[in-house]
Amino acid sequence: MGLAINDASVIYPSAEGRDPVEALRGINLTMGENEFIVALGASGCGKSTLLNLIAGFLAPTSGEVLLDGERVSGPGADRSVVFQKHALLPWLDVRENVAFGLKLQGVDSKRRYRTADKFISLLGLDGFEGSPVYALSGGMQQRVGIARALTCDPKLLLMDEPLGALDALTREKAQELILGIWEETHKSVFFITHSVEEALFMGTRLIVMSPRPGRIAHRFDLPFSRRFLGGEAARQVKASRDFIELREEVLKIIFADEEAA
Amino acid sequence: MTDDPDLSPATEARVNPRTGAFSWLMRARPTKPGETYGVPGQGETIWLSILSIATLLFAWWLVTWMGWVKPLFVPSPGAIVTKFVDVWQNGFTNTSLLRHTLVSTGRVFGAFLLACLLGIPLGIAMGMSPAIRGIFDPPIEFYRPIPPLAYLPLMIIWFGIGETSKVLLIFLSVFAPVALGARAGVRSAAIEQIHAAYSFGASRWQVMRHVILPSALPEILTAMRIGIGFGWTTLVAAEMVAATEGLGYMVLSASQFLQTSTVIMGIIVIAAIAYSFDLLMRFVERKVVPWKGRM
Ligand SMILES: Nc1ncnc2c1ncn2[C@@H]1O[C@H](COP(=O)(O)OP(=O)(O)OP(=O)(O)O)[C@@H](O)[C@H]1O
Ligand SMILES: [Mg+2]
């Protein structure tokens, strides 16, 4: 899997007397096999726009998005998206929701339910296969969303603030879960978050974005998720000196952006 | 707040949120497990409904029993029951009550079925395609607010006084609300649900079949309920012309002979059928879309 974004920009046209919004300008980003890129930045700096660009929901105003050398021309099963909320289908139970992608791809019911059950247990949802999704807690719904994105075995997993709605404890557990799955499945992940700590802990690379126009202002390589997967306890990683130093540095950048805006 | 001597005592006396008939407007009580807090209008209504019906019946019985109004204007509840038994046994204008009822239900449900078969797909198509919306929106919006009685003469001129113009009249009154409801229902799916389906490689057709249609279902069912209501409303108008059978016909011709009890009896039969069907639809709704409003 190789993703390359070359000098991409997105301008939302003016509407109802508002000025056009330059949501992204001059974005260059490459992403290789088994990378975990985290995007961080003030609200409105274009993170979701960048994700939509990669997902193929949006075409760049200029520049190009290449996936394995081919221009992205629309959404596809090789890139699955996990949304912040509202993306499950309430008329389907948990198993059918998880199997939804496979159903769309025409996989027969026996095989797709077997695959679904595998991912349901991977995300710790055993026993809830037949539950209606609206009767689940927010954290469980989010795990259903992640399981659903994984069943189609995408090369690239796109997550837009997937853990934003969770409480601190569930959130930390979900972070570890996602990292475990990432290690096991060797997928590439593009992950948006508002939490600096989450960003540093999860990613192999961090991009910090700045608003108006949205652009990548800083890039960091991150060692922390490897340390966690190497056996170090999550809290210990997050409390280590280099983690805290980097966290403060990134926070400073973001606060400076907020003030400039 | 409370240490403001000018405002607080007076304000509190006027709108004390804890007491008074409108306290439910101020604050919601915690719900039972399984219900969702703050859902508008949630709660049991059955006992109040029974009480409301009983009160109305009692008031009706009282005014007739005391002789406050003449039976010509308001016959007693007993007279209605007697009339019902009488017409049930002897028929009205040589046609049995059952036959009147079946003819009318046939007209209404026939028109309703037809309106659903055509209106729901058309409404969905209007929601999905700007071209189809552009074509069909003006005519539907144009005829929708016109009272069926106004175009009844046209129906008769064009389609004669037979069954066609009757069913067509009812059909038209059901068609618009059903089509517009289905059209609005298309908008119910969250954009994330649609995007999720596309990101699994779904075709446009699959997105419609697996995301847009199911999420439109609650609104379509509501539109059907509203639509059949319009159908019953139009029934009497449809049976005004050259009908020899039907509940609407029965009510109209009874009124010409000042048989008030038959009129009221007919009205109650129509209402009872319409209400039973609505209850059935609500039951279907609970079975088919238990997730309605819950996500
Ligand atoms: N459909 C749209 N039409 C016009 N402008 C848009 C549209 N979507 C986003 N924008 C603008 O583009 C900019 C970037 O939006 P985007 O949603 O990508 O931000 P974000 O970084 O995801 O923010 P958040 O963290 O709040 O989700 C914002 O200024 C926003 O107002
Ligand atoms: Mg966003």
Image (tube, helix red, strand yellow):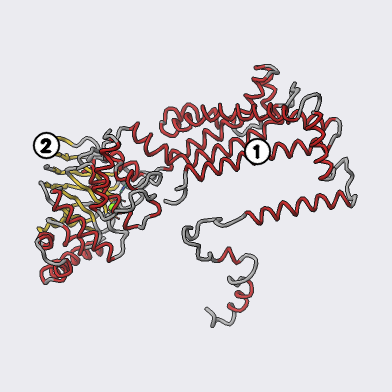
Which disc number belongs to residue A69?
Answer: 2
- At a point 11% along the width and 36% down the height, the residue shown is A69
Q: Is mark 2 on a helix, strand or loop?
A: loop
Q: Is mark 1 on a helix, strand or loop?
A: helix
In front of the other: label 1 or label 2?
1
Chain of the residue under label 2: A
Which disc number belongs to residue B274?
Answer: 1
Ligand 1 near label 1 (Cβ, under 8 Å)?
A: no
- Does residue B263 sit above or below B69 in this rendering? above
* Left or right for B142, reference B290: right
Residue A31 in view here = yes
Return the residue nearer the eye: A228 or B138.
Answer: A228
- At a point 35% along the width and 31% down the height, the residue shown is B205
Residue A22 in view here = no
Q: Where is residue A10 in the image (x, y as percent from the top left)?
A: 24, 44
To which quarter of the image does residue B7 belong?
A: bottom right
Going by the numbered disc 2, the residue's amino acid type is Gly
**Real-space Cα distance between discs 1 and 2?**
63 Å
Going by the numbered disc 1, the residue's amino acid type is Ala
